[in-house]
Image (cartoon, grey):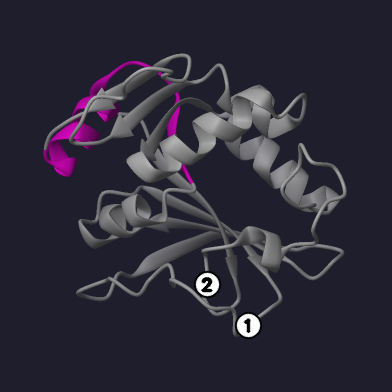
């Protein structure tokens, strides 16, 4: 059975809406923000284990306009050719991103079908509403967090929609040279 892994960038208080406010802005228009070397290595390790990505519809629409023209950088080199499965209730339409397919149906069934296929990890990147739904339905196997040392940003919080507590098991933690936390949690059981 494959592992469903959410990789999320957030502030210390759980804010997730704007990573460019959490991490140092970049001068390069092809990079939305900068990571320190340890964050880059954590991201590279995460995506190296994945051969499929599950995206929410809003993230898919936003990223299909940005990443195909982003030039060469590690995440663009990963996200552009990888198989993308989009949780949506409508067709992807004209101008669909390479190797993208819509997934229509109840989330537990969609996730179970993907996890039963052959392959490596299935990543969930961005797609905060989808990650919140996966957490609420206890469908995530692993949660990888890059936590920036900032609080008080406006917007959504990653864990704000949980209807009941979820106990996770910490399996990896690192502090980067610029004060970011790299945390990996797994579902218990």
* Image-based side of 58 in relation to 78, left or right: left
Picture mark count: 2
Q: Relative to 110, does residue 155 appear above or below in the rendering?
A: below
Name the residue carrying label 2. Answer: 15
Lower sequence index among marks 1 and 2: 2
> Whole-percent x and y of residue 65?
54, 32
Relative to residue 30, is residue 177 depicted above or below?
below
Q: Is residue 73 left or right of residue 178?
A: left
In the image, 106 versus 48, the foreground residue is 106
Please tell me whether mark 1 sits on a helix, a strand or a loop.
loop
Q: Is residue 189 in view?
A: no
Q: Which residues are magenta?
A: 106-125
Quarter of the image with the N terminus is top left
Residue 158 place in picture, x, y as percent: 43, 67
The residue at 24%/62% (across/down) is 136
Using the rendered image of the protein, determine whether residue 19 is visible from the camera's viewpoint.
Answer: yes
Residue drawn where x is 43% and y is 71% of the image? 156
* Residue most extreme to the front: 94
Taking depth in this image into account, of 164 and 107 the one nearest to the observer is 107
Quarter of the image with the C terminus in it: bottom left
Residue identified by numbered label 1: 151
Badge 2 marks a residue whose secondary structure is loop
**Pointer 1 with pointer 2, Cβ within 8 A:** yes
User: Disc 1 versus disc 2: distance between alpha carbons?
Assistant: 8 Å
Identify the mark at residue 113; answer none if there is no mark: none
118 drawn magenta: yes
Q: Residue at x 61, y 23 (%)?
A: 68
């Amino acid at each position: 059975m494959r592992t469903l892994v959410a990789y999320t960038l957030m502030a210390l208080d759980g804010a997730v809406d704007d990573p460019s406010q959490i991490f140092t802005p970049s001068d390069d228009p092809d990079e939305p923000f900068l990571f320190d070397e340890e964050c880059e290595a954590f991201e590279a390790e995460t995506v190296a284990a994945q051969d499929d990505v599950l995206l929410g519809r809003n993230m898919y629409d936003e990223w299909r306009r940005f990443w195909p023209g982003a030039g060469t950088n590690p995440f663009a080199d990963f996200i552009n050719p990888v198989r993308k499965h989009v949780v949506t209730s409508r067709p992807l339409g004209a101008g669909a991103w390479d190797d993208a397919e819509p997934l229509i149906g109840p989330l537990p069934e969609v996730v179970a079908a993907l996890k039963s296929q052959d392959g490596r990890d299935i990543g969930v990147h961005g797609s905060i509403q989808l990650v919140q739904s996966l957490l609420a339905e206890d469908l995530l196997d692993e949660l990888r967090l890059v936590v920036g040392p900032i609080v008080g940003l406006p917007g959504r919080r990653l864990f704000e929609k949980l209807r009941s507590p979820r106990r996770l098991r910490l399996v990896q933690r690192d502090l980067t040279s610029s004060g970011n936390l790299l945390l990996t949690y797994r579902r218990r059981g």
